[in-house]
Amino acid sequence: MLLAFQFQSPGPIMFEIGPIAIRWYGFLIASAVLIGVSLSQYLAKRRGVNPELLADLAIWLIVSAIPCARIYYVLFQWQEYAQRPEDIIAIWKGGIAIHGAIIGGTLAAIVFARLNRVSLWQLMDLVVPSVALGQAIGRWGNFFNSEAFGRPTDLPWRLFIPPSNRPLEYLNYDYFHPTFLYESLWNIMVFAILISLFFWSLKQGERYKVGTIALNYFMGYSLGRFWIEGLRTDSLMLGPLRMAQVISLVIIALSVLGLIWLYVFKRRLPDVVSPYSNIQN
């Protein structure tokens, strides 16, 4: 007999101090950021890069990624937010899009690399393991908010969703796919692969191509997101298309082409800085 693991959220509030409510979602995001910055600084030291550079970059990423993640989500849910515009900035209630965060973070990293005359791809190699781990942690915020779940299921590891959080067409169903858990576990696997690649790269010397870790992150995350997105009931849509799946396919294709460029054609990835960068390609 299969063991049943029926998940049920205790609610979005972690604890309250007077009128102040500390939410699980915000706590998990803050924890992911702190852990991610510490990890990136550790990896920078191992690569011989000034760790303070990664701390500075983290500020840029936070300032750009979180607002862009929210803007991306709101734009695709505009009909809903147009009715209650006061909730547009209520990020603590949930509702951010990872692809929006990736777009915002990438743009911030490009500007940061240019201003500091450092290698964009080297920076990304140092950051993306933390991004994967942070995504694994942050997905549990969806659990506490009872959001980002999948279709109804009778699987032993099903997730109970309160009636108030169910789509209208699924009001008569109690249990759903815990897609937050699927993506969290997938990102842990991606993180393990990236860390293994990082320590492998330290032994390869010039045979290692800068950008390899970043491209593997983009490809690995997108592979998981593509199949998990197909289970979800709350996908951001553009007509009949699930945007996360479309973007994932584009990223997978570009990542594969990038790896072929690096290891088949033995060329470097284009960068945004001068060849006199103090973090070398």
Image (tube, rainbow, N blue to C red):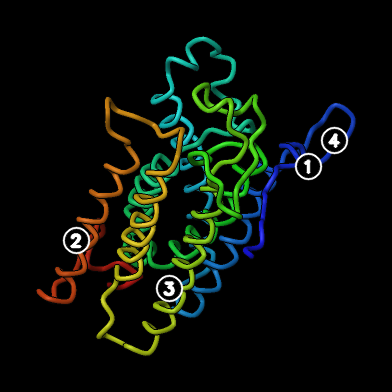
Looking at numbered disc 3 in the image, what kind of residue is underneath it? Ile
Q: Residue at x 36, y 62 (%)?
A: 220
Looking at numbered disc 1 in the image, what kind of residue is underneath it? Met
Q: Residues within 10 Å of mark 3 (few under 14, many from 20)?
A: some
Q: Position of residue 74 (x, y in %)?
A: 45, 25
Residue identifier under label 3: 193
Dot 4: element: strand
The picture quadrant where one finds residue 201 is: bottom left
Q: Nearer the viewer, residue 51 or 101?
A: 101
Residue identifier under label 4: 16
Mark 1 → mark 2, Cα distance in angstroms: 45 Å
Residue identifier under label 1: 14
Residue 125: mark in rendering: none
Sequence-wise, the earlier of marks 2 and 4 is: 4
Residues at circles 3 and 2 in contact by the CB criterion of under 8 Å: no
- Residue at the top extreme? 83
Residue identifier under label 2: 270
For residue 4, say whether it is visible: yes
- Residue at the bottom extreme? 203
Q: Residue at x 32, y 88 (%)?
A: 204
Q: Position of residue 246 (x, y in %)?
A: 27, 42
Q: Is residue 144 above or below residue 109?
A: above
Sequence-wise, the earlier of marks 3 and 4 is: 4
Dot 2: element: loop
- Left or right: residue 67 compared with residue 103: right
- Residue at the right extreme? 18
For residue 33, say whether it is visible: no
